[in-house]
Image (cartoon, helix red, strand yellow):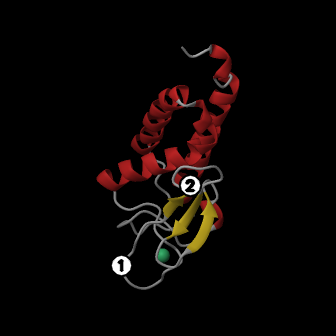
Amino acid sequence: MSGSSGAAPVDALEQALHAARALVLADLVAGGVAEADVVSLVEDSVAHRRWWVNEWPDGLPYLAGLVAQDVQDALLERYGRWPLCPVCGAGDPHALDVQPELGPDPHWVCGKAGVRVAAVGGLSRVPGHGVGGSGASPA
Ligand SMILES: [Zn+2]
């Protein structure tokens, strides 16, 4: 039996989901990939994570990192790698990873250089990233 008192308040849950959505959308905008169908990938992830965090309220602080990874995976299938690493100028373009994968305060990290590039939601302050294959440059 699980009492209702252990669950996170709905307000905190919705706030965390809203924040996660906003952070990942900000990074998509920064990479120039916030098109309608991409935004719907974020909505899909948020819907899934709403269910997930209801099952596991302790995961509330992890939502931003998880939504970022969900969207990253979904983009890889449809568009390509995102967000591209702005640190490594030479060699194969590669995507940044979210670290920690399951933890609070998620960051985009280059696994090759071992560099912390930006917080999730903070890519707009980093020049040179984008989505794989598109030559788009930030405005
Ligand atoms: Zn890199």
Residue 39 location, x and y as percent?
A: 47, 41
Residue 52 location, x and y as percent?
A: 49, 31
Q: Residue 92: give its label.
A: 1
Q: Residue 80: give its label.
A: none
Q: Secondary structure at mark 2?
A: helix
Residue closest to the eye, 68 or 135: 68
Quadrant holding the N terminus: top right
Q: State whether residue 114 is above or below residue 61.
A: below
Left or right of residue 76, residue 42 in this image: right
- Let me know if residue 138 appears in the view: no
Residue for badge 2: 27
Earlier in the chain: of badge 2 and badge 1, it is 2
Q: Residue at x 64, y 49 (%)?
A: 104
Residue 18 location, x and y as percent?
A: 62, 35
Q: Amino acid at mark 1?
A: Asp
Spot the residue most to the bottom.
90
Q: Residue at x 51, y 79 (%)?
A: 113
